[in-house]
Image: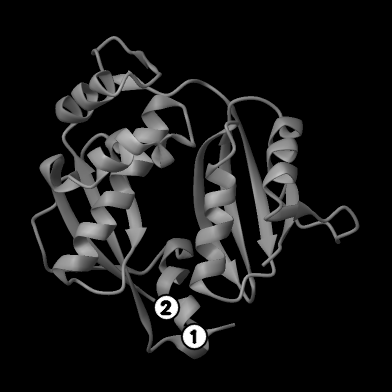
């Protein structure tokens, strides 16, 4: 697997061994208004780009529309993500085993719920309010997909974009990676068939019907460059 690819996103899949990197003091907030995204460094440019992606993920989750991040008005609002962030920190995770000396960086951002809710209303995005007045996502089913055939950070980005581009996907969360594949947890608006129809139209990911079954995986997909 391409080393640069591993360094960009492998931290997304490690469930233990997280070590905070000094930044802001980070207090736990509402997870619906937070997101973790991979970054290459703690530079201003990478932080701004990371916050933009993180806010887009939060808006997609809360609106119940996975494709909303590509809307022009949402892209414009996400470019001002620094105005909505409440706090952020960098988290570094270390590989175990042969790559124990390497580490990967995540930007973990918590956004202001009141400011994000106001933005959702101004953008006329979907969702509904719970008893506290916060906008929450629509309910949907959960499934896990294994995606193979990725060899670069660009492949990873295209695969995630294909998933989030489906109007049936409310959220997509990478859980772990191995060789040229990754496991992604999906929250769906409806059943798998709708997802397969969307992916067939996008032609980036295709189902592997003859693949050997993997425990805990509902669907196997092949990335097509």
Quarter holding residue 12: bottom left
Dividing the image into 4 quarters, which one contains the N terminus?
A: bottom right
Q: Dot 1 corresponds to which residue? A: 3
Q: Is residue 95 visible?
A: no
Task: Kindly give the residue lying farthest to the top in the view shown.
Answer: 131
Q: Dot 2 corresponds to which residue? A: 7
Q: In front: 199, or 5? A: 199
Taking the spot 34% from the left edge, 42% from the top edge, the residue there is 56
* Cα separation between marks 2 and 1: 6 Å
| Rendering coords of residue 135 (x, y %) | 31, 20
| Rendering coords of residue 200 (x, y %) | 75, 44
Task: Kindly give the residue lying farthest to the front in the view shown.
Answer: 72
Would residue 93 be found to the left or right of residue 114 on screen? right
Taking the spot 64% from the left edge, 73% from the top edge, the residue there is 180
Taking the spot 31% from the left edge, 73% from the top edge, the residue there is 40
Taking the spot 27% from the left edge, 50% from the top edge, the residue there is 52
Q: In the picture shown, does residue 52 fall above or below 119?
A: below
Dividing the image into 4 quarters, which one contains the C terminus?
A: bottom right
Label 2 crowd (10 A; few <14 / some 14-19 / many >=20): some
Q: Is residue 104 visible?
A: yes
| Rendering coords of residue 125 (x, y %) | 36, 22
Q: In the picture shown, does residue 82 fall above or below 66?
A: below
């Amino acid at each position: 697997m391409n080393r640069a690819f591993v360094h960009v996103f492998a931290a997304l899949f490690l469930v233990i061994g997280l070590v905070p990197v000094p930044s802001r003091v980070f207090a736990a907030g509402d997870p619906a208004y937070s997101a973790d995204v991979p970054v290459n460094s703690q530079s201003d440019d990478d932080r701004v780009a990371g916050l933009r992606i993180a806010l887009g993920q939060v808006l997609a989750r809360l609106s119940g529309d996975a494709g909303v991040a590509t809307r022009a008005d949402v892209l414009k609002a996400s470019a001002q993500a620094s105005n909505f962030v409440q706090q952020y920190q960098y988290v570094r995770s270390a590989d175990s085993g042969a790559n124990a000396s390497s580490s990967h960086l995540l930007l973990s951002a918590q956004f202001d719920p009141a400011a994000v809710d106001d933005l959702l209303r101004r953008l006329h995005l979907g969702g509904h309010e719970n008893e506290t007045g916060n906008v929450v996502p629509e309910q949907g089913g959960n499934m896990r997909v294994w995606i193979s055939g990725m060899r670069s950070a660009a492949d990873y980005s295209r695969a995630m974009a294909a998933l989030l581009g489906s109007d049936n996907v409310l959220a997509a969360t990478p859980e772990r990676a191995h060789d040229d594949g990754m496991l992604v947890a999906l929250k769906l608006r409806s059943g798998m068939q709708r997802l397969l129809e969307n992916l067939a139209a996008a032609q980036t990911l295709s189902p592997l019907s003859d693949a050997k079954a993997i425990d805990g995986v509902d669907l196997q997909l092949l990335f097509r460059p």
